[in-house]
Amino acid sequence: MQLNILAAILLGVPVLSGLIGVAHRYINARIGESVIYDLRQELYNHLQRMSLRFFTNTKSGEIISRLNNDVVGAQNAITGTIPNIATNAITLISTGDHDHLRVAVDAALGDRAAALHTACPPCGAHFARIYGAAPWSTTPT
């Protein structure tokens, strides 16, 4: 019975991970395209309000090129760079040096959390002795 449950989990986790990835990409694309659409609309409305002198002194190809390059640059930032920064920050927090996270939690939660973390180092030392230097390691030393 346990083997069947473990096999189902073993098959279910990658499927769930894939579905979450698809949903993430869909939401990211939807938000990015919505922002780019709004940006293009605003740029078009702004161009409509420009004076005739602006269009006389500026080549039309230069205007189109600048608008297109600016919109593509904004689209790359919205759909690529910003989500990557957020993902890397979450990864850093979840897998990085937990002392920095502990200090942030202490600062956010106040004296009770600080007292709890002050009492916790013996527990951390116990796990370090059992599992090695990293408490999250799965193989005992």
Image (spheres, rainbow, N blue to C red):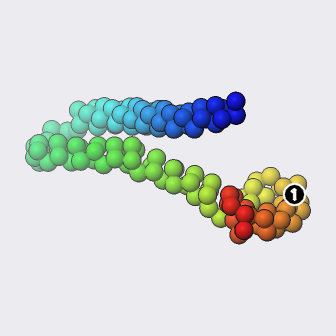
Q: Say what amino acid the circle numbered 1 marks.
A: Leu
Which residue occupies 70% across, 34% down? 2
Please provide percent x and percent y for residue 97: 65, 64
Is residue 66 depicted above or below 38 in this figure? below
User: Image quarter for residue 134?
Assistant: bottom right
Name the one closer to the observer, 77 or 42: 77
Disc 1 target residue? 116
Please provide percent x and percent y for residue 84: 45, 51
Name the one closer to the observer, 112 or 134: 134
Is residue 106 depicted above or below 23 in this figure? below
Please provide percent x and percent y for residue 115: 89, 60
Q: Say whether residue 24 is visible.
A: no
User: Image quarter for residue 37?
Assistant: top left
Which residue occupies 44% across, 34% down? 22
Q: Taking 138 as reference, is 128 left or right? A: right
Q: Quadrant of the C terminus?
A: bottom right
Please provide percent x and percent y for residue 34: 38, 31
Name the one closer to the observer, 49 or 125: 125
Q: Quadrant of the N terminus?
A: top right
Sort mark 1 into few (<14), some (14-19) or many (20+) by Cα contacts within 10 Å: few
Which residue occupies 20% across, 39% down? 51
Name the one closer to the observer, 114 or 136: 136
Q: Say whether residue 76 is visible.
A: yes
User: Image quarter for residue 100?
Assistant: bottom right
Q: Taking 81 as reference, is 129 left or right? A: right
Secondary element at image label 1: helix
Q: How many marks?
A: 1
